Amino acid sequence: MRIGLVVDSACDLPYDYFKQHDIELLPITVRIGDAILADHRDERATLQFLNTHVAARGHEAETTPFTVEQIHDLFIRRLVIDYDYVFCMTITKTRSPIHENALQASYSILNDYKAVRAAAGNNTPFALRVIDTQNLFAAQGILAVEAVRLREAGEGAPKIRARLENLALYTHGYMIPRDLHYLRARTRSRGDRSVSLLSATLGSALDIKPVLHCNRGETGPVAKIKGWDGAVQKLFNFTIKRIEAGLMTPTVCVSYGGDLDELRALPGYDRLRAACADNNIEMFSSLMSLTGMVNVGKGSLVVGFAADGPAFEA
């Protein structure tokens, strides 16, 4: 059985990984004023857009995911021919309409695929499964990497589906925003009152950085730590503890809202890389998606992994 994998462009993994493993992207289009870019995970284009538009006016950005019709057309045009079963893994449905769009598209895809496959000389059934990763950004990458691993191991679609749906429940994403004023402006533009003016002002004045946690579609602060470097170091140290205690998959994903040389220079990053190597964990470091950066701000950090254990401990 030919198994295909699809993610939306908010999923933070290196561009080369998507290409190497034939992972299809559902691009999200970002518009800031007259500037428009469809996010295809092109790192050079993303950094140029970031430095030109996002830093100053990113909180005004409009993000447009693939519509139901666009997802339907992508599958009918190519994916129903190239594959027999496709897993479409989306950003958490609590933060984006992508999951609902993909789910709605799946109904018409399953109604329309037979003639397309027959014309290509294939009369066997086609199936697809839309999976809510229940997470964001780097943490979305955990399911995508596991899907690749299972596919390459020759596992069948039922086992892959069960594994991914269970793994989503234990995948954790942790984020440290660099600029609370930006995050507040962005959340207000989206109608989200989760970052108040008082907390943003006090956090910036006192240099307090929140650690935000996402699991099972729910997001919220789990710690407030003095200083950017201190917060980053504590998040990396916590991740090392979870690695040493045992993860559910041999994968850690890290994404950063800026040049990756800045990420590699962060305090504790080298220790995290070493801990991954010592424990046979594959670590993926990537530029945060353009969608992620316009929503949480330039210079933000996200770490994702899957584990059954305690939440963040400062």
Image (cartoon, rainbow, N blue to C red):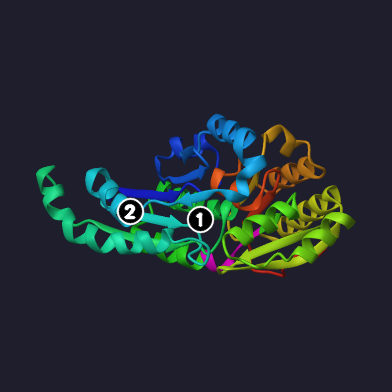
Front-lying residue, 144 or 189: 189
**What residue appears at the point 75 percent right and 49 percent down from the top-left corner?**
178
Q: Is residue 49 magenta?
A: no
Residue located beneath label 1 in the image: 143
Residue located beneath label 2 in the image: 86
Residue 116: give x, y in percent of width and height: 14, 48
Which segment is the magenta one? 168-173
- State the residue lying farthest toward the front: 33
Residue 170: give x, y in percent of width and height: 58, 66
Residue 200 horizontal side relative to residue 28, left or right? right
Residue 21 horizontal side relative to residue 43, left or right? left
- The answer to whether residue 97 of the structure is visible from this angle is yes
* Amino acid at the residue labelled 2: Val
* Amino acid at the residue labelled 1: Leu
Residue 205: give x, y in percent of width and height: 87, 55
Residue 125: give x, y in percent of width and height: 18, 57
Judge whether 74 appears above or below 92 on screen. Answer: above
